[in-house]
Every structure is written in C-alpha cells, then in structure tokens.
Amino acid sequence: MIQERINEVKALLPNDVTLVVVTKNHTVEEIWEAYNAGVRDFGENRVQELMSKVDKLPKDIRWHLIGSLQRNKVKYIAPFIHCVQSVDSLALYEEILRRAKLSNRSIDFLLEIHIAQENTKAGLPIEELEALIKTLLGREEDAPYMKLRGLMTMATNTDNREEIVSEFRKAKEIFDSLRGGIMAHHPEFDTLSMGMSDDWHLAVNEGSNMIRIGSYIMGARSY
C-alpha cells in the first residue's frame, strides 16, 4: 500500500518537486517499505524518535527535521541531519552552526515563516524575515557549515480552501521577492517547502517545490 501511494503521488508531481515522506509515529519496517519504493527524503518531527530510527536505516537517507527544534537537542542530530526545516531564530541558527562546526559538516536549513491564522503555528513573523536573512548574509565565515536553502511554512488547519490558497500564494510571493532581491546572488536559495497530506495539491499549484507528506502515504499512525 505504501508503495502504491508513493507512486500515486509521484505521478501527480512535477519533476522539480521533492517529496519528503514524514514518518512520525511510523515503524522502521514501514520506512523501509517507502525506501524500497525509491524515497530518499524523510522527515521527522521529534529528535528522540528520529534518534531511535536512524541507526536502523540506510545511510543514504536524507533526514529532514521538520518539527520545532530545541537548542539542547541539536547536538544529537548534527552529525547526520541533512536539513533543518524549522529554523525560526538567530539563536537556533547559531546552535546548529556550532554543532555543524564540531561535526565538520555542512547542514542545509530552511527558515520557517508564520503565515497561518492560528497563533499556535510556529515560525518567524514575516516582518522579521528580511532582517534575519541580512544578518545571516553578513556572516560569510559561516558558509562552509550552514546553507540557507529557502523557506518552509504551514497553512492554517481549516476547511476553507480559499484561505489555504491565499496563505500559500503569500508564501510564494515572499519567496520570489527574496530570490529576486537580497538572495539574487545565492542560487542555492531554491526551496519552498509547503504542503502536507491534506493540502499538498494546493501547495504545488501555488508554487511549492517541496512537500511533506505523512499519513496520506504512510497510513494512520500507530501511536
């Protein structure tokens, strides 16, 4: 079933859209099934759960941390994490940088922005985004260790399709504005991660080039 759903999603995706399969509360055996279906990008929300799985799975998996990340947990994932999609402060950036240096690695990251109507959603306020990016761009010595690849966001959890589309469209406008502005000379800034199981079709239509799908592919979670 997992392989069938992966094939179904991939058949509907443009070639330039990356599928990240979210494996929160799913077993190593289920992850293997997705891996054998060709998936290499996997997302986890919690460091503790990710750490319980990583050594039991192939080393060529690109792990994405997509949930809120506490600074005191960065040390556990820095030796292997491919991308932290939930960077929302300079303090978190600096801790990832510190651990990347200790591991002598380059870590990709996305800045998570808050576009949803819900206050409970995480992310950097849009009005603070450009100032943070300017600060990061001024730190050229960080470049071997930290690579800003783009933005991540989540839409409001609502049945109002127009609201979701409006939020995704707003995120794409911000992304395009940055690419044409302060990030114009940084071609590695190429990723807009938005869209999950319930709204990925809408996200792709609005310009997302990375989607994060869990239950739609993996099935109901076994809590």
Image (cartoon, helix red, strand yellow):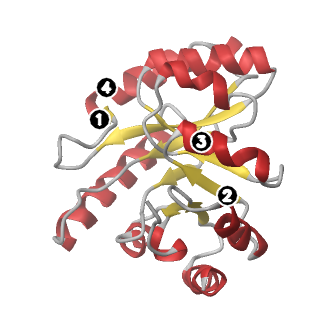
CA–CA distance in space, label 1 to label 4? 5 Å
Asked where in the image residue 57 lies, by quadrant, the reply is: bottom right
Q: Quadrant of the C terminus?
A: bottom left
Q: Earlier in the sequence, mark 1 or mark 2?
A: 2
Can you say whether 116 is above or below 182 in the image? below
- Residue pointed to by mark 2: 41
Q: Which mark is residue 97?
A: none
- The x, y position of residue 174, in whole percent, is 37, 45
Q: Earlier in the sequence, mark 3 or mark 1?
A: 1
| Residue at image coords 54%, 35% | 183
- The x, y position of residue 128, in whole percent, is 31, 25
- Residue pointed to by mark 4: 128
CA–CA distance in space, label 1 to label 2? 27 Å
Of residue 34 and residue 112, the one placed in the foreground of this image is 34
- Residue pointed to by mark 3: 189
- The x, y position of residue 176, in whole percent, is 44, 49
CA–CA distance in space, label 3 to label 1? 17 Å
The three-letter code of the residue at mark 2 reads: Asp
- Residue pointed to by mark 1: 126
Q: Is residue 187 visible?
A: no
CA–CA distance in space, label 4 to label 3? 18 Å
Q: What kind of element bears circle 1? A: helix
The three-letter code of the residue at mark 3 reads: Phe
